[in-house]
Amino acid sequence: MMMRTNNFYGEGGVRLELTPSTTSPLAIDVTESTEMRIQRLISENPVVIFTRSSCCMCHVMKKLLSAIGVYPTVIELEEEEISALPPSSAGDLDDHHHVNNIPADAPAAFIGGTRVGGLESLVALHLSGRLVPKLVEVGVITHVV
């Protein structure tokens, strides 16, 4: 099991590889299931995006959030780990949306522990004027931009 996380602070960003290790202070519990690890990461990070490697939709999601002043934690999942993501909510516009026969399970954005959805849902939230208040509510920004 390998999850990679990127926590972007500004344009340069920081990349952390979260792989089982006994020598690293960032060592992860290898007995923790993928589902438990994903739930922990959702609860520990106010804004998190789970994605596949080299996902262009994730890049657009990060750009949208950074334009608002939010730099999400980005977790790259292996294909077999994507099924461990919590299910979409009824309001997720990306639910049942398929591109090249790949379910739109990832990228998946979570704000304040709640699944927002993929790119389409995040953009719809922003265009409706509900994204910034949601980000203020979870404390990642303190004012409306």
Image (cartoon, helix red, strand yellow):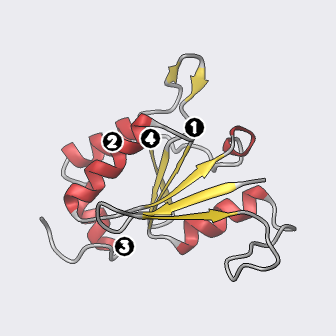
| Cα gap from disc 3 to disc 4, whole angstroms | 19 Å
- Residue 49, given in percent of the width and then of the height, sits at 48, 53
**Residue named by callout 4:** 118
Residue depicted at x 21% and y 77%? 142
Q: Is residue 128 toward the left or the right of residue 81 in the image?
A: left
> Are the residues flagged by discs 3 and 4 in contact, CB closer than 8 Å?
no
Q: Is residue 99 toward the left or the right of residue 61 in the image?
A: right
**Amino acid under disc 3:** Val
Residue furthest to the top: 100
**Amino acid under disc 2:** Val
| Cα gap from disc 3 to disc 1, whole angstroms | 23 Å
Q: Nearer the viewer, mark 2 or mark 1?
A: 2
Q: Which mark is residue 105?
A: 1
| Cα gap from disc 2 to disc 1, whole angstroms | 16 Å
Q: Which mark is residue 60?
A: 2
Which of disc 1 and disc 4 is earlier in sequence?
1
**Amino acid under disc 4:** Gly
Q: Which quadrant of the view contains residue 121?
A: top left
**Residue named by callout 3:** 138
Which of disc 3 and disc 2 is earlier in sequence?
2
